[in-house]
Amino acid sequence: MELRHLRYFIAVADEQNFSRAAERLHISQPPLSRQIQQLEEDLGVSLFERGSRPLKLTDAGRFLYGHAQQFLAQSVELKSMTRRVGQLDRSLSIGFVASTLYGIMPRLIRRFRAQHPEVTMGLHEMTTMEQIQALKDGRIDVGFGRIRYEDANVRRIILRDEPLIAALAVDHPLAHIPELTLRNLQSETLIVYPQTPRPSFADQVLATFHDRALEPRKVMEVRELQVALGLVAAGEGITLVPQCLHSLKRQDVIYKTLHEQHLVSPIIMSTRLLDESEDIKTLLQMIYTLYEEEGIAYQKPAPMD
């Protein structure tokens, strides 16, 4: 049994279809079928219920699926950490959700590059869920997202809880209410983003209403933050955004503090579970230093050993 067998098996299990799995792996279907058959012969068990549509795992297949995912994730970590220890690859690839760009992220990147020019940095905009998969695939080393999502192969560090604020058109009737609440907003069209993949920040915003037994009159889902703000400016509805969006000045949009308790969105730093890179530790310490310099409240976890 080789690593490629496990990758092929996971692809078929995820897609529940040999043809789609072959497309995902960029190979033709016959060699994929042969590799799965070879894996089953090697293990002496059937991994899929033949004839089922969509394709279903047997009990043995479900057992292997859970352990294969963890094993492949650890193999990616092992490769990454070995290269780092050998100083063969001083690179740091970072995934981020768009809203974090309006906080300390730009200063963090500039400071890290200035102090560690020997490290090549790569930046990739992606949703929290895309970051989780990219970490496990080895495509990024660090992710900055906002969704609390548990994965056994990923370490999450909650950096801080950022208040949510309302974005409204400057001439909106609610724009000048001194103490705006979610109850005031529930009669409006609520614009949420992103549409996919889910769960996402959109679900986080919807939960803020549902947790208070409130139901927006209408919900409009859009692809991204900038589209949401454009529709707000056009008078099509309102949206909730992290407080850091205050720095995104628009003449046609006003940001309003909401008088609600526990109305926050977390900023979460994610890494592979076993990655003890000094570069990652340095990046984390720089974040805390920037928060302290700016007087921003944050949550400091136990030190990374």
Image (spheres, rainbow, N blue to C red):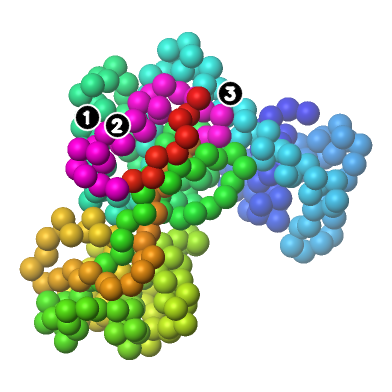
**Residue 286: which disc?**
2
From which residue to which does the magenta span run?
Answer: 272-297
Question: Circle 3: is it few (<14), some (14-19), or many (20+) Cα within 10 Å?
Answer: some
Work out whether residue 262 or residue 55 is closer to the camera in this orientation and state it: 262
Quadrant of image for the N terminus: top right
Determine whether label 3 and label 1 are within 8 Å by CB.
Answer: no
Residue carrying label 1: 111
Residue 114 appears in the rendering: yes
Q: Are marks 2 and 1 in contact (CB under 8 Å)?
A: yes
- Marks 2 and 1, how far apart in space? 8 Å
Dot 2 crowding, Cα within 10 Å, few <14, some 14–19, many 20+: some
**What residue did someone put label 3 on?**
78
Please give the name of the residue rendered at 68% of the width and 44% of the height, measured from the top-left corner: 10
Residue 244 spot, x, y in % from top left: 23, 55
Q: Earlier in the sequence, mark 3 or mark 1?
A: 3
User: Is 217 covered by the magenta stretch?
Assistant: no
In the image, residue 200 lies at what x, y percent? 45, 61
Query: Given the image, on which type of amino acid does mark 1 rest?
Result: Arg
From the viewer's perspective, tell me whether residue 174 is left or right of residue 203.
left
Of labels 3 and 2, earlier in sequence is: 3
Q: Which mark is residue 47?
A: none
| Closer to the eye: label 3 or 2 | 2
In the image, 94 versus 182, the foreground residue is 182
